[in-house]
Image: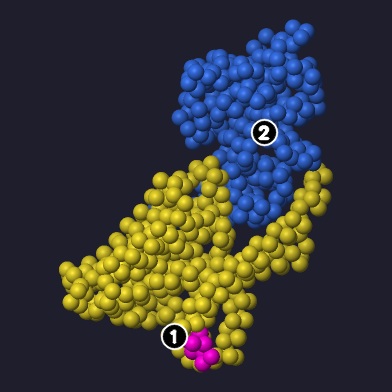
């Protein structure tokens, strides 16, 4: 399945042009399948995600969104099929290997430590170090400087990086989690339900951040239930139903009702599926 | 507070900021008040300031051990019994008393044995909690009972005839006090400036999140309990030096003082929050209170244990109040 039409809405990302889509995909899956015992969670999914694109994966509960996301982020290995990154076949045994290949995942629970400040959360497990040999210590100056750069330059948010995370609102917490992903300098970020349980304002903040990252050339994969949100901000929307990718839609050519129908039945009553 | 793009965030007034800072550093005003009170009501306490600090060394090391566990979101009830058992076991090996084993007179072997015993018990605590999945409270409570019992089973009389150099380590006030201060300094630097130290805070703040960001939480928990065991063993060595023998009740009841010292010092009961400097303040406070009780003409020696319990209760109440005020300020900032 492929959709080559150019999007016309104001939220589309300028880098995701026809030239890009004609080039090497940032991520490609070729007939990937994941089975857990006798249960087939994802079956024969082939898709291409292009550089700087915001690609949304939607589907009902149990449709296979999380399993597909986990295969891209290295949590699960496909039972069958192949994943390609920048045209090269890749295989991830764990999330660290996906990370080493430039793929970062922000999970729904955000994995934040409330008692610690923003900068410490961003760099936990990967602090800039100074010194030599066994006398290497955390370079706090560099840590705070780089955290500020990430928040200001990449996310465009003026948050005091010494603020403890427990003081942040839902949207700001999501930004810190995205900031931690950015600290690894990824070219693909997978966001698991980035706007779930957020207020309207916080959702808008996160959505704008996603647009900003895409404009910086980062490929974004969003796994979401929030169809309204992905319609506004995704370049393309892949719909999963019972483990299969049933369609890929461009927001300009679809609507909430149609996506809902695809998610719940796997087909359209009009019989119109892009293929 | 309206921030960029109309996003509503959280904010705090200057008064709340001051209150939050005060709550995080409450040990210092409390210590100042207690010192003033002792100076007014039991001034004779300060005639032996050096003795107060010397006496604070074993409890200081135990507070350090407990603080490390608390910061990581765990706790260790067995620190006192590890101190007592490791000191008694090593004393039996080194001592020349009739019922001692007297296997060697080398103080160096003694140092190695006491540290080894402490680290092995700490390691066992860590493995049972991290690998077997036992609840830290139940595991360390079991070890508290087991090793206090084992100590009593080994010896019910004071162990004497220990090598001079072995007892001199804890028996030389300047050395003992210096060792405690160096231990606090190293702990403070390690917690602040190493990935291990920050991982301890991360573990205490959220074990699940710490695991998700790639921290090997099982290994970390085992390491923390092992360090706690080693610090407890050093406390046992200091206790031995303080009196020159291994008394049969060595280490008993100290866990509660250590717990009170850490909590009064601002170490969170639920992990992830607290400073080692605050814990040192807690040590000084606990020891000053002990000395004042010992020097007070109106307090009988038999009442001291009861007052220790009250101090522990006050520490927990202070912590509880701190948490409530903090929660209220947080809630008031929410939109």
Callout 1 secondary element: helix
Q: Is residue A274 left or right of residue B226?
A: right
Any part of residue A147 in sight: yes
The x and y percentages for residue B180 are 42, 73
Residue that carries the numbered disc 1 in the rendered image: B50
Residue under disc 1 on the same chain as residue under disc 2: no
Say which residue appears at 41% left-offset and 65% top-offset: B79
Q: Colour of chain A?
A: blue
Say which residue appears at 55% left-offset and 75% top-offset: B311
The x and y percentages for residue A62 are 62, 24
Rendering colour mode: by chain
Say which residue appears at 68% left-offset and 31% top-offset: A214
Q: Which residues are magenta?
A: B293-300
Q: Residues within 10 Å of mark 1 (few under 14, many from 20)?
A: few
Report, in whole angstroms, how far the alpha carbon at label 1 lies from the one at label 2. 60 Å
Q: Is residue A258 left or right of residue B290?
A: right
Q: Main secondary structure of the magenta part?
A: loop
Callout 2 secondary element: loop
Residue that carries the numbered disc 2 in the rendered image: A193
* B310 is higher (above) or lower (below) than A124: below
Marks 1 and 2: CB-CB under 8 Å?
Answer: no
* B30 is higher (above) or lower (below) than B20: below
Q: Residues within 10 Å of mark 2 (few under 14, many from 20)?
A: some
- The subunit letter for the residue under badge 1 reads B
The x and y percentages for residue B106 are 20, 71
* B182 is higher (above) or lower (below) than A248: below
Q: Colour of chain B?
A: yellow
């Amino acid at each position: 399945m492929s959709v080559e039409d150019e999007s016309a809405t104001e939220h589309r990302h300028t880098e995701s042009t026809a030239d890009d889509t004609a080039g090497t995909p940032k991520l490609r899956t070729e007939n990937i399948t994941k089975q857990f015992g006798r249960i087939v969670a994802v079956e024969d999914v082939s898709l291409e995600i292009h550089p700087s694109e915001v690609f949304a994966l939607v589907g009902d509960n149990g449709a296979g969104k999380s399993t597909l996301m986990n295969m891209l982020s290295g949590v699960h290995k496909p039972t069958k099929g192949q994943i390609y990154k920048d045209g090269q076949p890749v295989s991830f045994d764990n999330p660290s290997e996906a990370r080493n290949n430039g793929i970062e995942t922000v999970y729904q629970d955000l994995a934040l430590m409330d008692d610690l400040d923003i900068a410490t959360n961003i760099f936990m497990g990967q602090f800039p170090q100074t010194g030599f040999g066994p006398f290497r210590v955390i370079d706090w100056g560099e840590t705070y400087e780089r955290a500020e750069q990430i928040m200001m330059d990449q996310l465009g948010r003026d948050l005091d990086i010494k603020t403890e995370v427990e003081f942040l609102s839902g949207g700001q917490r999501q930004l810190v989690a995205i900031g931690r992903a950015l600290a690894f300098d990824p070219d693909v970020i997978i966001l698991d339900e980035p706007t779930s349980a957020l207020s309207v304002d916080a959702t808008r903040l996160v959505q704008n951040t996603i647009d900003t990252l895409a404009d910086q050339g980062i490929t974004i994969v969003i796994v979401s239930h929030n169809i309204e949100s992905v319609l506004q901000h995704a370049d393309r929307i892949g719909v999963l139903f019972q483990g299969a990718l049933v369609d890929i839609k461009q927001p300009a050519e679809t609507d909430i009702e149609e996506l809902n129908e695809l998610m719940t039945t796997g087909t359209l009553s009009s019989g119109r599926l892009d293929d | 507070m309206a921030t960029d793009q109309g996003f509503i965030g959280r904010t705090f007034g200057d008064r709340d900021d001051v209150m939050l800072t005060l709550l995080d550093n409450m040990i210092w005003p409390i210590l100042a008040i207690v010192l003033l009170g002792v100076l007014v009501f039991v001034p004779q306490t300060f005639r032996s300031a050096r003795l107060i600090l010397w006496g604070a060394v074993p409890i200081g090391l135990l507070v350090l051990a407990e603080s490390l566990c608390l910061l990581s979101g765990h706790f260790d009830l067995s620190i006192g019994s590890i101190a007592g058992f490791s000191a008694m076991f090593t004393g039996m090996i080194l001592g020349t008393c009739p019922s001692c084993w007297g296997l060697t007179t080398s103080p160096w072997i003694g140092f190695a044995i006491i540290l080894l015993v402490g680290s092995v018990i700490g390691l066992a605590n860590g493995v049972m909690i991290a690998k077997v999945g036992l609840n830290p409270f139940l595991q360390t409570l079991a070890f508290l009972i087991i090793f206090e019992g084992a100590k009593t089973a080994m010896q019910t009389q004071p162990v004497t005839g220990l090598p001079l150099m072995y007892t001199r380590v804890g028996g030389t006030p300047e050395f003992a006090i210096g060792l405690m201060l160096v231990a606090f300094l190293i702990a403070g630097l390690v917690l602040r400036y190493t990935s291990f130290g920050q991982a301890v805070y991360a573990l205490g703040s959220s074990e699940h999140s710490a695991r998700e960001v790639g921290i090997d939480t099982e290994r970390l928990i085992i390491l923390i309990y092992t360090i706690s065991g080693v610090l407890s063993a050093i406390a046992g060595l200091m206790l031995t030096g303080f009196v020159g023998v291994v008394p049969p009740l060595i280490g008993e009841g100290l866990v509660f003082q250590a717990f009170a010292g850490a909590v009064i010092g601002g170490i969170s009961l639920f992990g992830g929050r607290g400073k080692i400097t605050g814990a040192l303040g807690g040590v000084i406070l606990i020891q000053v209170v002990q000395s004042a009780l010992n020097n007070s003409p109106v307090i009988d020696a038999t009442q001291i244990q009861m007052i220790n319990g009250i101090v522990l209760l006050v520490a927990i109440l202070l912590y509880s109040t701190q948490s409530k005020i903090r929660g209220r300020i947080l809630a008031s900032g929410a939109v």
